[in-house]
Amino acid sequence: MSLKRRDFVKLCTGTVAGFGVAQMFHPAIHEAFADTLTGKRPPVLWLQGHGYTGCSVTLLNHGNLSIADVLLKFISLEFHPTVMGSEGEQAIEHMRSIAKTWKGQFFIVVEGAIPVAAEGKYCIIGEAGHRELSMVDMMKELAPDAAAVLAIGTCAAFGGVPAAKGSVTEALGVSSFLEAHNIATPVVNISGCPPQPDWIVGTIALALELTKQHGLEKGLKEVVKALDSQGRPIPFYGRNVHSNCPYLPQYVNDEMSTSFTDKKGCRYDLGCKGPQAFCDSFERKWNGGVNWCVANAVCIGCTEPNFPDGKSPFYSNV
Ligand code: SF4
Ligand code: SF4
């Protein structure tokens, strides 16, 4: 079964008859992964910058597809500081040899922001030849030769918490960093603090399928067409939280919750930022569909470029 970009958008937004939101991955998406078992698996280098590994944890908890299958069978994860067995100079040299052998055809996943102050010394990700290698060094070295960069989490996409007011590290998101260094490699932003793991796996499926159908260069152009103005995949980030919230009728009728234990009303007066936020967690939900942000608390607008400063204070809208 072939999956077109247009179909993918419909499937992921749950608008295709017969595939409800509980079944968040249509069989065609499973096939997009299964097909890669017969072909070359794209090498992926996962770099962790200025962050706390939460985006790796959210992905490792993914339940819709086996994450072991995604990482080990469908892509070829060649470097990941948290889960790889190798370490030290050997790991760095392996990463460099993959980038050389697969020039123009490997992918970089970035988790965390890129701190540029103090010549990048706030984030050292390895060492080789008795020289410390910063996130800045590795991005300047590897990104120009990558096919694309996936910026996972709001820190990697837009700077996020490490770039918030008071930080001294001058942290940047991937796009801003590449732009500052005239590196034209395409970037896909999968924002969220952390992102819902379906958004990560679904975007990888989209990229695999489109590059398989059209070849690497044209396929990546098709991926870029599926992004919104913030570089995020429209299937996951194309809808406003507030406009699709189950509490919208209460908002319209001015029936507001005044405490977190009051689950009946709209959470706007408790600080909900749903009107300013775009994602599909109102229907995809979290933790295997058990719950979502607004059901128990408020939306804090974690997918947006101005998070967290522009969404603070989280628990007030006055
Ligand atoms: S709870 Fe938040 S997202 Fe939902 S209707 Fe109220 S303000 Fe909008
Ligand atoms: S609903 Fe709001 S807080 Fe929850 S994931 Fe979406 S943007 Fe983030």
Image: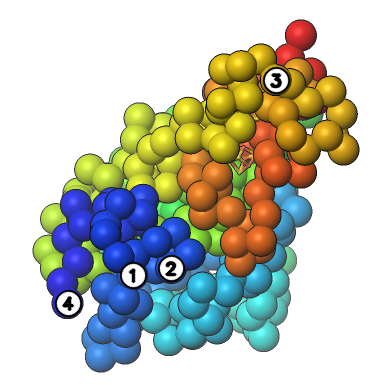
Looking at the picture, does residue 211 appear above or below residue 110? below
| Residue 82 screen position, x and y as percent | 69, 71
**Where residue 23 is drawn, which disc sits there?**
2
Q: Is 96 situated left or right of 91 in this image?
A: left
Please give the residue where the numbered disc 1 appears in the rendered image: 26
- Residue type at mark 3: give it: Glu
The residue that appears at 74% across and 34% down in the rendered structure is 264
The residue that appears at 23% across and 43% down in the rendered structure is 225
Q: Earlier in the sequence, mark 2 or mark 3?
A: 2
| Residue 22 screen position, x and y as percent | 48, 64
- Distance between the Cα atoms at labels 4 and 3? 47 Å
Query: How many neighbours does mark 4 have within 10 angstroms: few (below 14), some (14-19), or many (20 or more)?
Result: few
Please give the residue where the numbered disc 4 appears in the rendered image: 1
- Residue type at mark 2: give it: Gln
* Callout 1: SS: loop
Q: Is 11 situated left or right of 94 in this image?
A: left
Circles 4 and 2, Cβ within 8 Å, touching? The answer is: no
The residue that appears at 51% across and 73% down in the rendered structure is 64
The residue that appears at 33% across and 70% down in the rendered structure is 26
Looking at the picture, does residue 301 appear above or below residue 124? above
Looking at the picture, does residue 248 appear above or below residue 77? above
Q: Give the farthest residue toward the bottom.
A: 38
- Residue type at mark 4: give it: Met
Q: Is 86 situated left or right of 279 in this image?
A: right
Q: Quadrant of the C terminus?
A: top right
Q: Is 309 situated left or right of 283 in this image?
A: right
- Distance between the Cα atoms at labels 2 and 1? 7 Å
- The residue closer to the viewer here, 129 or 10, is 10
Circles 1 and 3, Cβ within 8 Å, touching? The answer is: no
- Distance between the Cα atoms at labels 4 and 1? 11 Å
Circles 2 and 1, Cβ within 8 Å, touching? The answer is: yes
Please give the residue where the numbered disc 3 appears in the rendered image: 255
